[in-house]
Image (spheres, rainbow, N blue to C red):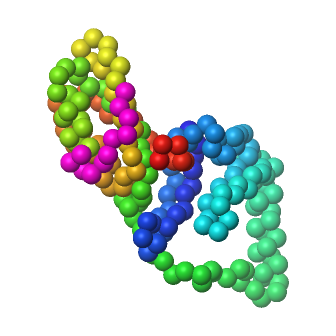
Amino acid sequence: IKLLAVAELNSEGTGVIVRVHPAMIPRDHPLASVRLAFNAVFIEAESAGQMMFYGRGAGGAPTASAVLGDVVAAARNRVTGSVGPGESTYANLPVLPIGEALTRYYVNLDVEDKPGVLASIASAFADNGVSIQVVRQDGHGDEAGLIVRTHRATDSALRRTVDRLRELDTVKRVVGVMRVEGEVGA
């Protein structure tokens, strides 16, 4: 589980979706090795493929260095009458709502362990256009823990699904929902 800041084009290339959230990533993903006071920027580009830039970025000294660098740049700009780096004009794309973000999800539920429960849960996903990739159930007594991993779905579709799950009498609790990023099982 990593805290990610994600900026990506939507599937049509007509807008940018920007979000910050914790997410599960595969253990073999390059970002999985980032630890302690280190940060990384992972980029996927059509022409360049995958690239990762890695270095110190958290903690006292790195933060102080970054702040000092910003202060020096601001002072230099003030002395020279400059306003700093200009805004990029490469693309004039709108920032789209988080509801349009497309990713996979991990949904953890406590449910009643009886016939028909899995079917009603699957219907809640299907009715909202969310395709299930994997289901794992672990029964204990008259209840069960149910873990559902989805194929890629929009954030808004997943939110509607979770709202519907909370309405089901057989769902005792939505324990957690987390995004899943990376290529494994995409």
Viewer-nearest residue: 44 or 144: 44
What range is drawn magenta here? Answer: 126-136
Is residue 74 shown above or below 177?
A: below
Q: Is residue 70 magenta?
A: no
Horizontal relation, residue 15 to residue 172: left or right = right
Visible residue check, residue 159: no
- Location of the N terminus by quadrant is top right
Is residue 175 shown above or below 18?
A: above
Viewer-nearest residue: 83 or 134: 134
The residue at the point 37 percent across, 27 percent down is 136
Visible residue check, residue 33: yes
Horizontal relation, residue 94 to residue 76: left or right = left
The residue at the point 78 percent across, 81 percent down is 77
How many numbered circles does the render carry? 0
Q: Quadrant of residue 41?
A: bottom right
User: Percent x, y for residue 11?
Assistant: 43, 66
Horizontal relation, residue 2 to residue 145: left or right = right
The residue at the point 34 percent across, 24 percent down is 137
The residue at the point 23 percent across, 35 percent down is 121
Horizontal relation, residue 65 to residue 107: left or right = right
User: Percent x, y for residue 25?
Assistant: 56, 42
